[in-house]
Image: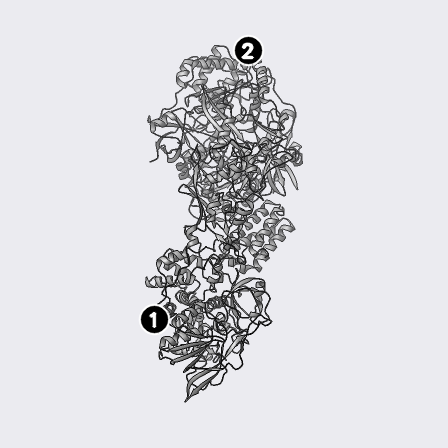
Amino acid sequence: MSKYYLFHDQKKCIGCQACVVACKSRQNLPKGPFPSLLITIGPQWVGTRPQMAFAFMPCFQCENPWCVAACPTGAMQRRPEDGIIIVDPNVCVGCKTCMSACPWGSPQWNPETGKVVKCDSCYDRLEQGLQPACVTVCPTACLYFGTPDEIPEVRRERYARAMIHDGEQEN
Amino acid sequence: MTDPTCKVNDLGIWLKKQMDEGKFETPRSRQQATEISGFLSEVCQGLAEEDHITAIMKRADFLASAGETAEIRGAGKKIISDVEENLEIFLGHIQTHTCPSGACPMLTPAPCQMACPAGIDIPSYLTLVGQGRYEEAIDVIRKDNPFPWVCGLVCTHPCEFMCVRARMDAPVAIMDMKGLAAEKAMSARQYKNPEPKPDNGHKICIIGAGPGGMTAAYYLALRGYRVTVIEALPVSGGMMMVGIPRYRLPREVIDREVAMIQDLGVEFRFNTRVGKDITVAALEQEGFEAYLLAIGAHGSYKLMIPGEDDFPQVITAVDFLLRVALGDHRPPGRRVAVIGGGNVAIDAARTSLRLGSEEVTILYRRTHDQMPAHHMEVVEAEEEGIQFSFLTIPKKIHGEDGRVTAIECVRAELSEPDASGRRRPVPVEGSNYELAVDTVIPAIGQEVNGSGLERFEDMRWTRRNTIQANTLSMETHQARVFAVGDAVTGPATVVEAIAGGKKAAHAIHRYFEGFPQPKFPRAPTRRGRMAFFQVPAALKADLKRVEMPLLGNERRRITFQQVRLGLDDTQARNEARRCLRCDVCIRCGRCVEICRDKMGINALELGYMDFDHPGKTDLKITAERCIACGACATNCPTGAMQMTDQGGMRVLSLCGTELNRLKLEYCEKCGAVIGPARYHDYIMRRIREISPKLAGKRVCLDCARQETGRRHVEMAPPEKE
Amino acid sequence: MEKDINSLCFMCSVRCPIQVHVKAGQAVSIIGNPHVPGIEGSLCPKGAAGLSLLSDTQRVQTPMIREGERGAGKWRNASWDEAMEYIAQRLKSVISAHGGRSVAWGERTQLSTHISKTFMRAIDSPNHFTHDALCKGSLNTACRSLTGYTDPQIGIDYANTRHLVLYGRNMFEAMEVKPVRQFSRAMENGARLTYIDPRATITASKAHRYWMIRPGTDLALNYALMHIIIKENLYDAAYVKKWVTGFDALAAFVEPYTPEWAAAETGISAREMVEFAEEVSRQKPKVVFHFGYRCANHENEIYLRRSILMLNALMGSIEAPGGMFIKKGPGEVGAKPARKLTDQELPKCADIRFDKVGTPDFPLPDPAHGVAQMLPEAILKEDPYPIKALMAYRFDPLMSIADTARTRKALDKLDLIVTIDINYSDIAWYSDVILPESTYLERMDSPQQANGLKPQMFLRQQAVGPRYDTRPGPEIIKMLAHRMGLSQYFPYETVEDLVRWQLEPTGFTVSDFAEKGFVAYTDKAIWWDRDTGIKFKTPSGRIEFVSALLEDAGYPSFPAYQAPNAPKQPDMFRLIVGRCAQHTHISTQNNLYLNELVSENPLWISKKSAEKLGIYHNQPIVVSSDRYEGEMHAKVTEFIRPECVFMLHGFGHQVPFAGRSYNKGQSDAAFMENITDAVGGSPAFHETFVRVRPLR
Amino acid sequence: MTFRNGQKVEIYQKSADESWESYMDEFVGLHGIITDPDAVKNDPDALVEVSLDEKGTHRFPQDCLRILED
């Protein structure tokens, strides 16, 4: 785990994929790689209600990253200062071992460069005091990024708020 | 070695750097620069047409005139001047699809093609021959050499010296493959001329019907010139016909290929020596606008020993071979001494034997190993019973009644190496002896006989008594007069004369078109990029160079039948599969380096790649070590190394040589390919310590991601939780 | 050098405020304008894909003049001078032969529309029309019939609503960033969402109540809801008394439309309707029955839209926090809006419009927009007079007007077709001249008058110079006007000149926009007094249930309910169409990133119907209507009513130069019949029936 | 020095001979193989044919050549 944490509030997510596009656009990627991906589950009927869920899949920036261990060239690295895992394109030779090693499918293949690309939590933006691109553009503000203590207890807060309002309106 | 540089590639690199540094701030200029960069890259990859230059210049003009900053305008100007100054190189990339600098990987020619003086696209025709496509092979060869059959039999084949396969075992039999193609195409009536351009009205006079003159005639005729060839002898072919004996080169071979040139409308005038039978003034009268001197080197050096000029039985090898070629088949004598150690000496000796001479001895000043003659020729001569007397210096020719009776020689020994490292033969005092012979054939060198060319007054001669000509354009110091072949180089090879003839044809055309003459050696033209033969590594490694079958020794001694009997289809098929396809694999070594130094796997042992320090090559070891990660293929700049999934296997191949073949595994969920077990084992070993439990489950990357996503979602109505 | 430019997006027509980061002259990132409350950096996926439009090599890069047959794809590149001269010569000859009225100008409404309108006035043609009718002409008419305002003049207070009711308004896919963001927050605070659609969309999956209604029966539902609300006194009686006319007539009219009757018609249970009516009544007036966005489905479209608006009126939610409001302009605070070129003294055209809007034949649609789908018949029948030239400005009749084959036939009769566009649209490909417009990132535009609770003005500011030989629309029109000898109406050279001229009366200058991208006329939300101050612009000054506009034109205010048309054959499906979050109409299908996300439009078909036809998921199928037959892929799903099939709009492009979208999917317009709501003006896009069979 | 077919050589200097042409200047330092020595009489004055690594086959005067190995 990096020192940061990205929380995806699936309740608010509408699956629009602005996050995915902003991510590709930031790295100026061609067709193919998705360093972050939004996975749609459903729809399925839950009673009379069609239910869909979306899972946002950036890199989880593992504490003990398999991709780094698998990489024979040293291109895949964990930044000591913040634990973000990055790939150095100057060292990567495109052996794809990181891709196969990662259980979450996070490292992606860039067919234009013949190298791996991945979510690097937009560390360049973080260094400028900004949020990652995906978090910044999310229209419903369902993505939260920060150190774990900064992440709001979203679900608990929502419940509390709903209780207050519903109390007013419903019974 | 410094990194190779190419003007086109350099400009592309420079432009990219300018863009990376943000020199093109306005998007419009940046777009123009991006487009130029794209065009340059296409030029470097051989994907460009000539209008690419126009397109580049149009955009550069925009930058130079409408660029928003002085820097952008400066860049535009630099691009314009770079292209203008190096137009020859830019056009070369586009027209020939080769960049001999080595900086443009896709355009780097094969060493064999570079070595061929005529620049034949050897890998392409070898492939075609290997597929039995002889007609197309001949078309490819004749784009650069109108004498594939002749050269298929007698070429000195520099290509084979440079053949990379030689660093593994023995060179590909490039020459023999060419001979086969010509024979097969001719026999199937598929040996055809290309369609010539329409008549352009210009008249060209070529003096000498040897390989140089006739090659020029061929390419000029194809370009629509009206060509006349003037020949002093009654036959065409020059030294090919009157210097090379028939058992090496049958007359029919020359005749058929010359006939192809005649077929293009080239006029031949035989028995016509310029300066004697026709004057230069008369030729001018006829309206010839340019001349090509291709008179060869038919004069002979003299032995400068007593008795040389006193007997009719002393006949130079050149004169002897000419006489035989023109039909005089009397033996020169019973006991013949041939003097010299070169190919001509061997030819004279073997010819004498075939005419019925009983004893033929070659006298040579130096040792066997120092004989300049081609090794195979020496071996075949020895097999036929030619005697050799080495370290033997002729001193005097003795005779009686106007007939030669003996040659007096002195034995020699080699000196200690002198300052230049040369070991000279030094006569041993008092070792004189006489060898009883009735004929002496000196074969110690030829020279140009320039008589009759005096009217070309501005032409200059070298101290070697050859015509001085620029070896790129074949121009002499006389305007409108070009020269090629032995007349320029001194006695040299057929293929050099052919190369010269082709260069001269280009130069004459450029002269008429008003184009400047080339400043650099013209790069050979890549005629295609043929599909690879799929060959297992073991077979590739084990295929031995084809052995040319030879005529039986008994027949050889008594007839002029062709000695080298030629290859058959099967032999050719196998021989073509020995080719390493250096037109695609440029031996940059990136694959080896990545596999060994970056991946630490070292599954590629391709020692042949280094010209200066070839190491061990083991094509079979890859299958033992390679994990099929594909990094070599990904980083291969030319597509020589490829990794593909076929028939349930992942196959790594280098120019079609299957280096490794591993069974694919499939995703347990969706059935997508997930690569071979050995690859996964490699990864598992690397991550074992941090993921000890992970084993067995094989899902593809997409499914892994989907799976994880699924585990992360909650599916519940959006109400209170 | 790095800088941030505050500007306006134009990946769709919503024009969300954006901020473009520019480094060494190149745009390197786009985010939502962080200075704008309710945006705060956010973008939709289309907005996020803006840079791939900017860098697209598959957009029009230089003026082009057709060389071969129309649509054959043979072009020569031309200079702007050459292209303008070419157009001007041909326009002049058309005008001299057939008069100014023979020129039509079709446009997707945008910030520069006042300029093209000025051009048309200057050449004495009444035939400027916009895309609007195709989207929501009947809604516009419905709004005017009830309130005197058009739909763009009415806003929705998403942030404070307690209940949002959507009739097929698929707001989480056909998304506008600010409403999505505001309503997401409202939902977090307990706001409820009811969604009514024959197809279960993502929006449906977010709703607290989802009704999979029988297609075309929404009006039945609404009549029943009004029946319940009136019968059970669930309406805001004080508000109705004060602000509504014709309530009694409505009450009498809906009396027979019981929930039980509607249940049979719509497939929604009567009990649910009653529960719903009771719920919204508790929440009133913080209730919004959304009047819709694209409202062009049925021949009685205007009456459905009126019924939705009437439900709002019954809830007392028009001009109520958490409900709807009338947008306030600068006049509310005594300030002035930016002026427009059309404010000038311009020739008055005496001719009627080609679509006959404003005549007794077609009295009610908004003449400011006209009725685009009338164009093909007007050309073909030369009724009311010949049309000989078409200027298409970011508007594509081939893919936007139903019945493409017919439209193409009409276009073939024209002497001149000119397209101004960024992309190689299908109409561009079918034109005689293509004039490439600079993208929204490469140009400044006329200021946007953003009326609302707090009137503001936004400015699209140029982030980067044009990448190709393109120009901003206002400069293109000015160039053409100059060639036509009409310069006097276009007092500017550059867009910046124009903006300065427009801003003159406002007291603001261009530089005032630099910091935040907008200027505010006030910082306080303006609500009119619900007792005394709501300024309805109807003749009565109230919400007219019984509408003077309609009745005066001879149309009823409440027509009796008519069941939707049945298919001609029982094996046919009603074709319904819609949008996804990743594409804008017909304009983004070739965008590198958006195309990668959604590259084709499969046909949604219910599992039940598919099983009957032997069609499985992802199978190639043939879809045919009376107008067209084409191949698609089947998306077999439980989430659509069995009597209808669905396809996304905007696919099936036929331009080889736009390689990513070329021949991908099918265009809904090709299948459709060109049918119009004769009262309101919208086309009826959901009145086409198709057959589906597996591809053999 | 006599040159034989197949010997590896280096163009180690420019030649003073008249047959040396200016484009050959950039060949200095390159390695190659003797492909056609003086095939007749080991004349130190004869031009010999050398195939250069990646730079083609040319005739050179002998004073610019040096044998790299036998």
Foreground of the two, B41 or B450: B450
Per the rendering, the mark at residue A171 is 2
Could you classify mark 1 by the number of other residues whose Cα lies within 10 Å: few (under 14), some (14-19), or many (20 or more)? few
Q: Nearer the viewer, mark 1 or mark 2?
A: 1
Q: Residue at x 62, y 43 (%)?
A: C25
Alpha-carbon span between mark 1 and mark 2: 121 Å
Q: Is residue C56 above or below residue D47?
A: above
Q: Disc 1 designates what residue?
A: B554
Q: x, y percentage for residue C414?
A: 43, 41
Q: Is residue B530 visible?
A: no
Q: Amino acid at mark 2?
A: Asn
Q: Residue at x 39, y 80 (%)?
A: B335
Q: x, y percentage for residue B183?
A: 35, 63
Query: Is the residue at mark 1 from the same chain as the one at mark 2?
Result: no
Q: Amino acid at mark 1?
A: Glu
Q: Secondary structure at mark 1?
A: helix
Foreground of the two, C171 or B216: B216
Q: Chain of mark 2?
A: A
Looking at the rendered image, the quarter that the N terminus of chain C falls into is top right
Q: Is residue C251 above or below residue B334?
A: above
